[in-house]
Image: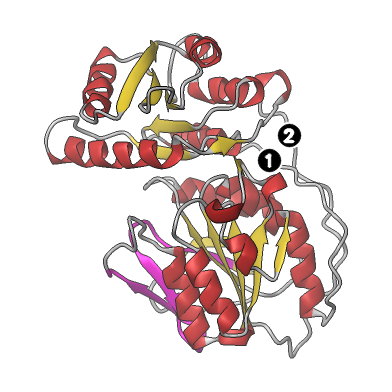
Amino acid sequence: MADGRIRVLVADDSPTIVAFMEDALGADPAIEVVGIARNGREAVDMAASLKPDIITMDIVMPRMDGLAATQLIMGQTPTPIIVISSCIDPEEQTITLNALNAGAVAALAKPTEIFGTDGDAFRNVLLTHVRQFCRVKVRSQPVASGTPALKLPGPAPALAAPRAKSPYQVIAVGASVGGPTALFNFVAHFPPSFALPIVVVQHIAPGLLPTLTAWLHESTGRLVEIAQEGEAVVGRSILFAPDGTHLTLTENLKVHLTDDPPVGDKKPSIDVLFRSLATSLGPKAVGVLLSVVGGDGPGGLGALKAAGAKTFAQDESSSVIVGTGPARPELAIADYVLPPGQIARQIGQLVRGEEAVASPIPGPVSPIR
């Protein structure tokens, strides 16, 4: 951004999509497309030579796909990457989630039609994401040989199950950039006996939630589902807010879904979930923010803390996005600022009435299959 303009590298092998992307991005005089990569290998090379502010990355490309390219870029020349993917094809959904695990800052669903209302809506979302993420600094995410070779963690630390009269009834989690990885590292460090339910708002492209919830279920052994109106939140379950719907909880731990307007540009909104718990449960709730970027989340976390809830935020060292201070207001709000696995351990201690912070726990991540 030497001349003040946002420099974008577009990686896509489709001439039609490339023309559409150039037109959409070029409509903003503050944005400049500095290069077109026709495959993943070119994207890796051009990321190093052009040093763009941000990259849009297709998933299915010749020579090297978008996942491998994302892994190499994040290991060699860390750059904010927005994955542009079909969220209809199950295989592409899986690759897209692995790209998010590799360090991509966001995933957007390709428009089914580039002309008309679908294309216009995509243009607006694309421009919003480019402006939001172009200035963030991302952390290097090295992956051996450019492949998803990381494995599931070993057994979780031996923590006792919650007491029959635990002071807490539910854990509420908000996540965005790096959320799938952070969620895995959070959930995987609770023992099988840990009984508190977890409700989650994850900022993610529409259509990816079924793949994400299935992966978390298979990799952690917990019941992971998309929430439905009126269902009870029960022990050991993990419920996600559905696409395009706000999730709140009542005092008797029943799900209430609403079609209220977005908060900012977020629907579901982390703030909506957190504020509902501040009102309905107060000190009986635990609030956790994982890898959040933007305005959604810190306000709700503050409301939870004011209501007497325990509050946690993911620390900078384990986050995809580098930077604290004004960009991470939740760090000043949270009672504890820790890596995801250590947050899980600390919650286990709090449930048992222990306040001491646990020693650090490494945060492995499983490739999505």
Residue 360, visible in the rendered structure: yes
Position in image of residue 139 (x %, y %): 64, 35
Quadrant holding the C terminus: top right
Q: Please state the extent of the stretch shown in magenta in the rendering.
A: 238-260
Quadrant holding the N terminus: top left
Q: Quadrant of residue 163?
A: bottom right
For the residue carrying disc 2, how many other residues have a C-alpha within 10 Å: few (<14), some (14-19), or many (20+)? few
Compared with 224, 353 (above or below) is: below
Q: Are marks 2 and 1 in contact (CB under 8 Å)?
A: yes
Position in image of residue 197 (x %, y %): 62, 73
Amino acid type assigned to the residue bearing label 1 in the image: Ser
Q: Nearer the viewer, residue 354 or 328?
A: 328
Element on which disc 1 rests: loop
Amino acid type assigned to the residue bearing label 2 in the image: Leu
Position in image of residue 305 (x %, y %): 59, 78
Q: Please give the name of the residue rendered at 58% of the width and 51% of the height, measured from the top-left corner.
A: 291
Q: Which mark is residue 107?
A: none
Q: Which mark is residue 366?
A: 1
Most distant residue in the front direction? 3
Label 2 sits on residue: 150
Q: Please give the name of the residue rendered at 70% of the width and 27% of the height, measured from the top-left corner.
A: 142
